[in-house]
């Protein structure tokens, strides 16, 4: 980053955008896109990364990884703090996301599974075993059009 | 399709893709060339994408919202394709269960959310109702998964 603030300036934004389209590009290639020197690009990437504002990582296609089933489950929490229930649900590998939400449900969770047969045991033995999990409202994905997980939101955390 | 060795490589690359092929090879006991060719194959077959994940760099970090849609079923796939085009919309799937289409959106403000839903989404032909809930706290979001085009 420019060094004086904790925020991205215009050059940081353009470098981040270039990295989003291809995180393996060399500093030289990015330098040509954004119109700065390779040394500047390398320094900017390092300071954004060191500050925890940018991470270059592989995103795996969930279908290629063998996840046939993707479900968004709204969870009503009974007689327990929703946040505590959310923390417990977050420990399961198949639970890809957990958010506290406004509205009818206390939590919205995203679940990936290799097939429908495995969902049954997962619901019973993992989700069902968490105290406080009440009524579930499920939407099962038929066809995924877009799944772009490259921005961390407020209070976000990486696992 | 990915095999167990690919999965081991992705366990490392999913956390930090700047690790060199040589270092991954050393950790897994494989040749550097093997790692390089496997990564190339996974990228070429669109099983993975190496990208930059950014966080909270602006004054107003985006808020995540879940928007469920009920639509005329004869318009299901067209509406799904139309919402996919919106930049604020980060996840779109046609679903069975409580919604016909589920979207996850990132907005800068409640005003932006209102305008996204009423001006852009509700005006699409075939959309009957929307159900929105706002994420007040993200406990987990696993960035290692996504749809690679």
Image (tube, helix red, strand yellow):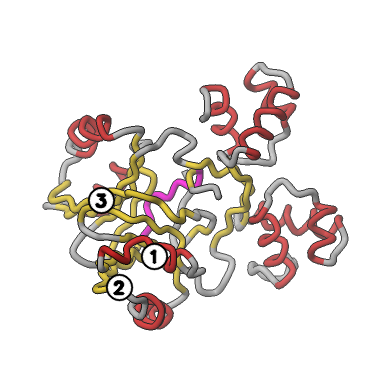
Q: CA distance from mark 3 to mark 2?
A: 25 Å
Residue ID at (32%, 49%): A141
Measuring 43% from the left and 80% from the top, which residue is drawn there?
A: B112
Chain of the residue on which disc 3 is drawn: A
Image point 58% across, 54% down: which residue? B53
Please give the residue where the numbered disc 3 appears in the rendered image: A73
- Mark drawn on residue B78: 1
Circles 3 and 2: CB atoms closer than 8 Å: no
Q: Which residues are magenta?
A: B137-144
Disc 2: CA contacts within 10 A as few (<14), some (14-19) or many (>=20): some
Residue B100 percent across, percent down from the top left = 27, 60
Q: Secondary structure at mark 2?
A: loop
Q: Is residue A147 left or right of residue A34?
A: left
Instruction: Find disc 2 in the rendering and name its residue.
Output: B126
**Label 1 element class:** helix
- Dot 2 or dot 1: first in sequence order is 1
Within-10-Å neighbours for mark 1: few <14, some 14–19, many 20+? some
Q: Is residue A90 visible?
A: no
Marks 2 and 1: CB-CB under 8 Å?
yes
């Amino acid at each position: 980053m420019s060094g004086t603030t904790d925020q991205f300036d215009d050059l940081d934004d353009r470098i981040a955008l270039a990295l989003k389209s291809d995180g393996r590009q060399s500093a030289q290639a990015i330098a040509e896109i954004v119109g700065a020197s390779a040394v500047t690009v390398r320094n900017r990437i390092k300071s954004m990364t060191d500050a925890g504002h940018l991470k270059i990582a592989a995103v795996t296609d969930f279908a290629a990884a063998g996840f046939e089933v993707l479900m968004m489950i709204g969870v009503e929490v009974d007689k327990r703090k929703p946040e505590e229930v959310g923390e417990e649900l977050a420990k399961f590998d198949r639970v890809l996301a957990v958010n506290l939400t406004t509205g009818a449900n206390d939590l919205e969770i995203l679940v990936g599974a290799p097939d429908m047969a495995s969902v049954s045991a997962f619901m019973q033995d993992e989700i069902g075993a968490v105290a406080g999990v009440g009524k579930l409202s499920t939407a099962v994905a038929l066809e995924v059009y877009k799944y772009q997980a490259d921005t961390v939101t407020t209070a976000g955390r990486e696992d | 399709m990915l095999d167990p060795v690919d999965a081991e490589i992705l366990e490392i690359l999913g956390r930090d893709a700047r690790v060199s092929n040589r270092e991954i090879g050393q950790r897994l006991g494989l040749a550097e060339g093997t790692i390089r060719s496997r990564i190339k194959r996974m990228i070429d077959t669109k099983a993975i994408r190496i990208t930059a994940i950014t966080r909270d760099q602006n004054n107003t970090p985006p808020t995540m919202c879940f928007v469920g849609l009920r639509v005329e079923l004869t318009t299901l796939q067209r509406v799904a394709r139309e919402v996919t085009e919106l930049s604020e919309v980060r996840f779109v799937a046609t679903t069975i269960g409580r919604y016909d289409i589920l979207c996850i959106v990132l907005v800068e403000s409640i005003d932006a959310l209102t305008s996204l839903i009423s001006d852009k989404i509700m005006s699409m032909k075939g959309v009957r109702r929307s159900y929105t809930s706002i994420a007040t706290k993200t406990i987990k979001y696993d960035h290692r998964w996504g749809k690679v085009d």
